[in-house]
């Protein structure tokens, strides 16, 4: 696993575990630190998408048309997670 953005990925892992699969845009805007504060230096959506792609804990579980540009965006979930 790469070391870039490891704290953000850990916070994203916790957020997805609690709230279910999310888009990269939702992760950038909604993820908070372990102490509940907003992330100070937020990564770009492209950075988050790359980090999710290279991290073994995450998997693209679908696509959504809720992107800011109107195109399809990936929905990220936890590997091995099945929706009830």
Image (cartoon, rainbow, N blue to C red):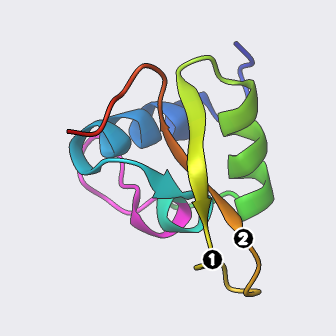
Above-or-below relation of 11 to 63: above
Q: Secondary structure at mark 1?
A: loop
Q: Position of residue 36 (x, y in %)?
A: 24, 53
Other-residue count near label 2 (Cα within 10 Å), few / some / many at <14 / 14–19 / ≥20: few
Magenta stretch: includes residue 25: no
| Viewer-proximal residue among 9 and 67 | 67
Above-or-below relation of 71 to 33: below
Is 1 positioned to the left or the right of 15 in the image?
A: right
Quarter-of-image position of residue 64: bottom right
Give the residue at mark 1: 65
In magenta, the rendered stretch is 28-39
Give the residue at mark 2: 72
Image quarter in which the C terminus is found: top left
Whether residue 44 is visible, yes or no, is no
| Dominant SS type (magenta) | loop
Other-residue count near label 1 (Cα within 10 Å), few / some / many at <14 / 14–19 / ≥20: few
Residue furthest top as drawn: 1
Tell me whether circle 1 and circle 2 mark residues in contact (CB < 8 Å).
yes
| Viewer-proximal residue among 39 and 13 | 13
Q: Position of residue 34 (x, y in %)?
A: 29, 40
Quarter-of-image position of residue 14: top left
Residue furthest front as drawn: 84
Above-or-below relation of 48 to 27: above
Residue at left offset 31%, top offset 58%: 37
């Amino acid at each position: 696993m790469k070391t870039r953005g490891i704290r953000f990925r850990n916070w994203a892992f916790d957020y997805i575990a609690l709230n279910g699969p999310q888009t990269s845009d939702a992760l950038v805007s909604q993820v908070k630190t372990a102490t509940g504060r907003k992330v100070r230096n937020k990564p770009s959506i492209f950075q988050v998408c790359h980090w999710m792609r290279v991290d073994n804990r995450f998997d693209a579980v679908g696509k959504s048309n809720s992107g800011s540009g109107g195109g399809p965006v990936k929905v990220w979930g936890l590997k091995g997670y099945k929706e009830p």
